[in-house]
Amino acid sequence: MPDNPTPSEQTPSSGGYQDQVIKGHKYDGIREYDNPMPGWWVAIFWGSVIFAGIYVLGVHVFDFIDTYEEDLAESLEQLETVRTAYAEANPTFEADPATLAEFVGEEQAIEAGAQTYAAVCASCHGAEGGGSIGPNLTDNYWVHGNTNMDMFNVITDGVAAKGMPPWDSALSPEERAQLVAFIQSLEGTDPPNAKEPQGELYE
Amino acid sequence: MSTLSVSSSAARQERPSQVELFTYDEQIVRLFVLATIIWGFVGMLVGVIIALQLPFPEANLGEYLTFGRLRPLHTNAVIFAFAGNAIFAAIYYSTQRLCKARMYSDLMSRIHFWGWQAIIVSAAITLPLGMTTSKEYAELEWPIDIAITLVWLVFAFNFFATLRRRRERHMYVALWFYIATIITVAVLHVGNSLALPVSFMKSYPIYAGVQDALVQWWYGHNAVAFFLTTPFLGLMYYFLPKAANRPVFSYRLSIIHFWSLVFIYIWAGPHHLNYTALPEWATTLGMVFSVMLWMPSWGGMINGLFTLRGAWHKLRDSAVLKMFVVGITFYGMSTFEGPLLSVKSVNALSHYTDWTIGHVHSGALGWNGFMTFGMIYWLVPRLWRTRMWSDKMANTHFWIGTIGILLYVLAMYTSGITQGLMWRAFDEAGRLMYPDFMETVVQIKPMYWVRLIGGTLYLGGVILMMINVWKTIKTAPKRLPDPAFAVPKRASAPSDGEQEVATA
Ligand code: HEM
Ligand code: HEM
């Protein structure tokens, strides 16, 4: 009696393999075929070994693949180009009481400030400015002063001790000035569920 | 009992005058199977809870039931309790049959079983209490680590003593995978857990800084390799040809992919530390070994799927084979994805994102989960000598489980790639487009809900399996004596020579 499967078990789907059962290999009824390893499998395996060799040599010996440092330097350089080009096209903005005053009360600035506010500030200061993690921005009480310049500085530098992040790298000076305009426009709106006053009263 | 029937050629054999009688310990396998199912349910329930806590923070209850405390409980429960008990069930069932020998010591088997369950219970208590080494997948504190080592040594001794007493000359490939598992896990666990205790439940690793990180991921990666991969390949090599009743596709492939897999896996750990303080040459090593790992992994997939050549029609009626096929396919996908993720430029996008979570669960839910379920549906009627209570329910499990995996992984790929792209986006002024982490969270929140639905479906499948197994066991005969066999009393007995003398 051969160990091979009966003809009915030999199916056309054997895919070109001989399907010869190995004699003596029968483990709790499990048999094994003597088929070769698929050619594509062997080829890709060798391919990956060759790739590995080339990659190691490329990064660490012949330097035709970037190292981390080279990669980082290149990206920083690209970023610098973008930043310089942008700075040239958009003359810098010097925040001082006079320029800020041009924003405050300005319809377009308030509108733009509202959008930035909803995206970055609302999660801590409340959607309507009534405060939650951060203080209420609609009342007359201020922890760090109530002039346009005071607000601009708090937005720019943050208040590390209280968890307010600095926004100087994330928001442009115009965006920060628009925020000042928006916040000044909130005064006295008294939204529902506003937070209790914090800081000093400014009349 | 089809599996235990007298082999056809035995009739040709002369009845030897001197015979050796032996039995298989099936009770220990039943215990491990039940533990697998129960812990699988617990671990995945915790998975669903933490999946809810991410989009719905209100579900973080008190101090002990917060995401930070429950996440390690989830990973420990699904890996060491669910997958762990599953591979022990597979090993205890198949090793005895592949060796034609009962386990060396029933007592050691019991110590292994109860010791392991005690370790799991202690993990379930200490982790929510916040007692942790904070090393991922090795969070348990030093007294529990010592217990793990001792129980594992008992298991190893029992296993190797059984191998020594085997009545089969050759060792089938499944056994090689078990050997690799048992030896390597012992080395990994001890190596990574070396620590100086400062009090009863607190210790500090003997490694510091980047060395600690490297040891941790040498361990972490090889936990995937030797806890979630090699024992499951052994499981596949035994249960798949059994269930399909087909010879294994290629013996040669099984040798080559076994040795290449175990050799290459060990070096790939640094791919978890790309772009960190680890020197770049080490991450290069991790990356290229990961790429070379692709085909050794696929060797297992090929040997699994090609074994089914000519048996594909059997899939229609067999939930077991359907589970195996989907399991092996997910194994193939996650072991293609893994090498891809290890490539530095891809990892620059994927690292720290949900893409990793998607990758993990395509392996965990697809490969570990479905191979385990397939094995359970094959084993339960045999161990309890009856029929599965409901084949329809098993099929339903298969389908909702598959849909659950797809929802889970597709949601995580979407959210992972979204996170990765948002984190690296710059605007026209050269500033970060989304400097506020919250913006990415808001963006991916819907995907967290989709993942929750997927996970709940998957858990629903597990609940169906619990009911089905429970009902099946209730129809089992009262007495389940161990199956007994006889072989001629000669050291080099031909493997066909066994005679069954008694079954249930
Ligand atoms: C119902 C099924 C499951 C659900 C809903 C689920 C859910 C989760 C969640 C929400 C996380 C945390 C992800 C994060 O931190 O962002 C997680 C992590 C994890 N889960 Fe699951 N899980 C399930 C099943 C499994 C199974 C069966 C396994 C293993 C066999 C597994 C292994 C893991 C691992 C290893 C991690 C950590 C991943 C990492 O740190 O990268 N899970 N799971
Ligand atoms: C050829 C095989 C594989 C390779 C090369 C591989 C590679 C990787 C890579 C590169 C990562 C991401 C590391 C990071 O960015 O942090 C990863 C994470 C992970 N993989 Fe795989 N993977 C493979 C197979 C698998 C399989 C089959 C499973 C599960 C059964 C698995 C489970 C995990 C887990 C749990 C993590 C998360 C680790 C963590 O950060 O907590 N992997 N893998």
Image (cartoon, rainbow, N blue to C red):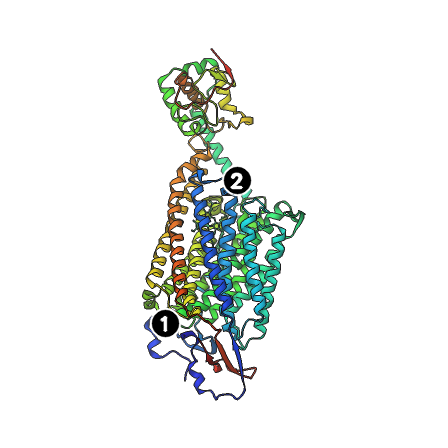
> How crowded is the residue under tag 2: few (<14 C-alpha within 10 Å), some, or many (20+)?
few
Residue B192 relative to residue A171: left or right: right
Residue A16, which numbered label? Answer: 1
Instruction: Find numbered disc 1 in the image and state the secondary structure of the residue it sits on.
Output: loop
Q: Is residue B283 left or right of residue B387?
A: right
- Give the SS element for disc 2: loop
- Please tell me the numbered disc located at residue B63: 2
Give the amino acid type for the residue marked by disc 2 in the picture. Glu
Left or right, residue A121 beside residue B283: left
Q: Amino acid at mark 1?
A: Gly
Which image quadrant: the C terminus of chain B?
bottom left
Q: How many marks?
A: 2
Nearest the camera: B384 or B364? B384
Q: Residue at x 53, y 38 (%)?
A: A73
Q: From what the image shows, is residue B216 above or below residue B28?
A: above
Quadrant in the rendering for residue B380:
bottom left
Looking at this view, is B211 or A141 the one in front?
Answer: A141
Query: Do circles 1 and 2 both sit on a common chain?
Result: no
**Chain ID for label 2?**
B
Residue B260 drawn at (x, y percent): 52, 63
Classify the position of the N terminus of chain B by image quarter. Answer: bottom left
